[in-house]
Structure formats: C-alpha cells, structure tokens
Image: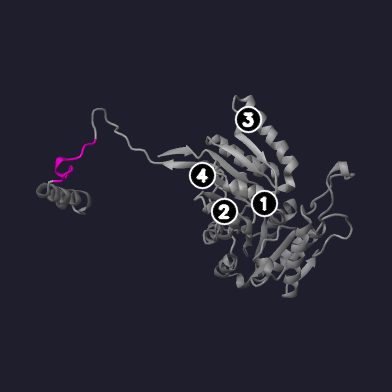
Amino acid sequence: VEYVPFGVLGVIAPWNYPFHNMLNHVISGIFSGNAVVSKVSEHTSWSSTYFGKICRVALEVNGHDPDLLQTVTGFGEAGAALVACDDVDKIIFTGSPGVGRKVMEGASKYLKPVILELGGKDPMVFCDDAKIKDVVPWALRGCFQNCGQNCCGVERLFVYESVQEEFIDAVLPRVKSLRQGIPLATCGADGDVDCGAMVMEGQIGIIQELVDDAVKKGATLHCGGKRNPKLQGQFYEPTLLSGITSDMRIAQEEVFGPIMAVATVPGDDDEECIRLVNNCSFGLGSSVYSGSQSRGMKLGKQIRSGMFTVNDFGVNYLIQSLPFGGVRESGFGRFAGPEGLRACCLERSIVEDRIPGVHTTIPSPIDYPIKKEQGLPFGMALIQLFYNESIVGKIKGIF
C-alpha cells in the first residue's frame, strides 16, 4: 500500500489558538507531500498572516518553494470558494457543527473528501473513589483554561452523589478566587490574570441564554452567571452551576465559555453515569477519574467519544503521535499521529511480481475464448482449492 499526497489541501482554521490550529495542518500537509492553502478566521487575519510568513521563510531557508503555503483571509465566502476550487483536493475544517455541515454539503458537489473537527461537550467524571482534593485542579483547568474557549475543554462534570457535596465545597472558593482581566502589560496590566475575555461579543449572549435556561429549569447558581460588571469589555464571570440535567440546553449545546456545569450521578451508579454521559450528541474527548485504574478504563471504554483519558485531561492533544478527532456531532476524520499524516494522502494498492523470472499468466483453459469443456471444470477446481474448508476437499478439487 502506497500513501500518495493528495496535491493541495484546503484548511479552514478557527479563531481559537490561531498559531497551533493553523500550523498543525501546515506541518502535516507539507510533511506528507502536499501544498497547503489555509483560510484563516476573519478574527485572526493579522496574526495568521504573520504566522504564514514564518512558515514560508522556514520553507525557503530549507530549500523548498515558499509558495507551497498560501494564507487566505476573508469571511464565509472565502471558505466556500476554497471548498469549490478545482485545484483543492481535500478540505480540513475546524469549527461549529452548523458550518461543518455547510462545508460537507459544498464538498459533496465535487465528491471532495473532508475532515471535520466540530467541537464538543467533553465530559469529566469523578467517581466516588476519586480523591476530591486531587481532582479539583483538573476540573478548574478543564473548564477555565482559555476562559473555556477550547474545543476539547470540559463542558460537563459528572460527580458521583456521595462526593458531590465535598466537591462543591472544595471547588467553589477556588472558582470565586479566579482573577479576571486583561493580561497584557501594554494595557497597563500586571499579568496576574486567570481568565481573560470572550473573543467575540456575541458569545456572551449565547452563554447567558444557556445559564438562564439552566437556572430556570432548576440548576443551582453558586457564583458568576453574568457579564463581569467591574470590567469594561467582553468579560463573563467564571461560573459554577450544579444540578445540571439532560433536558437543559447547557447539557446539550456547546458553551465555549468560563462555565463549570456539574451533574449528579445518582446512587454512585456506574451504568447510570454512562447513560448520562452518552445522552449528548457530541463526542470529542472524555476523561474519568477513579481510585481504580481498571474501573476508570472500563467506564471510559463505554463513552462514545473519539478520545479518552483515565485520571488525566487533555493529553490527547499534547501527544502529537496520537490521532485527534471525534464522533457524531464532533465530526469525523483525524489529524495528528500517523493516522493524521495518512489522512493527507490517497491510499493506493500496488501489486508487482516479486520473484525474478516468475510472471503471472492466464491458464489456457480460461483464456479467451474460453474452452467450455476445460474451462468450467478448471474454474470449479480453483473454487474448491481456495474455499473448501478441509484439506481433503482442497486436494480433491485439484485432482
């Protein structure tokens, strides 16, 4: 089997982590023998153009044509043009399920293959035998890193009933103590910031709708739950909610904000935990924390997701030798790892004569025009030789 470069990869990159989410596809595309055209988010046009220049100089310094990488800026029309372009052989898209469907629809007109990474509602499970003091830092990291604007961030916490009160008591003061503001010294800040702002103003309205819906349907708001009134700009307060149920929008829709949403696993029941976790259309990453490694692994293998960790979080993205991607509403296809490099290639099956002087020929009984008296018995003998389950039957087929 030979892996042949597609030719030109079209990458439609998101606005979060603009350097990495652009560079990872550039590296895998070029290393697998392709040219790459990267359409970046309209929110990262300046920085992505700068990053593109870095890559082009690196190519040139190492003796390669810098034009192997092209950076395209623009709005949705630019992405649609990339999908429709005859010279682009495959599309790699990272973004929302809604736009992902449009990309897939556009590519289907040309039977053009796509990889879709569409975000998620990643669950983090804390079993009753997990040590709460040890898992609280992971919950905070999973929910509040980059102010929650992570495709593989934790959006659903499932805490077993017998340890939920202990967990809330431990995590609430930590959430309340998170420092929010602008981290840049150029803005007069000292850098002592845990949570920054939302990248887009419109996201604050989406988050508020989800929080309000949860509270209206019975969730408990412990802190936060609104735009930060002490700061000017697009700041939403770090928020802790508990009592989350599957009928709440916040349990089903991507938040992409600084929200810790805690659901209870009643009766410390493992089967009920899996039912609750899988009652969601997304399936990107997942993690289970348990005092028993085997129990954590058993639970994790039942979660419908593209990635899973036991007593850890997010390392699937850190370990670039592993494939990254999800299932269902989180998309399909993989990047990173050997699987990601091969996804940038066509698979081509090749057969050749390996023994010098030995060549494949067509036996005369089945050579055209076929001799009926000899051809039919010869064909039946071959069938017995290849498919008869007994050795005796195979031998009889020959003779």
Q: Which numbered disc, 3 or 2, marks the residue that appears first in the sequence? A: 3
Residue type highlighted by circle 2: Gly
Real-space CA distance between mark 1 and mark 4, rounded to the nearest whole angstrom:
25 Å
Q: CA distance from mark 3 to mark 1?
A: 26 Å
Q: Earlier in the sequence, mark 4 or mark 3?
A: 3
> Of the residues tagged 4 and 2, which is closer to the observer?
2
In the image, the segment drawn in magenta is: 360-370
User: Taking 213 as reference, is 63 left or right?
Assistant: left
Q: Residue at x 77, y 63 (%)?
A: 205
The answer for how far apart the CA atoms under marks 4 and 3 are is 23 Å
Measured as percent of width and height from the top left, residue 69 is found at 62, 35
Q: What label sits on residue 106 in the rendered view? A: 2
Identity of the residue drawn at 75% across and 67% down:
209
**What's the amino acid at mark 4?**
Ala
The amino acid type found where label 3 is placed reads: Pro
Q: Please name the residue that numbered disc 4 is placed on.
A: 343
User: Of helix, strand and loop, which one carries label 2?
Assistant: helix
Q: Residue at x 60, y 49 (%)?
A: 93
Residue 329, located in which quarter of the rendered image?
bottom right
* In front: label 3 or label 1: 1
Can I make out residue 72 in this image? yes
- Observer-side mark, 3 or 2, equals 2
- In the image, taking residue 132 as reference, residue 235 lies left or right, namely right
Q: Is 250 above or below relative to 201?
A: below
Contact check, label 3 and label 1, Cβ < 8 Å:
no
The residue indicated by pointer 1 is 76
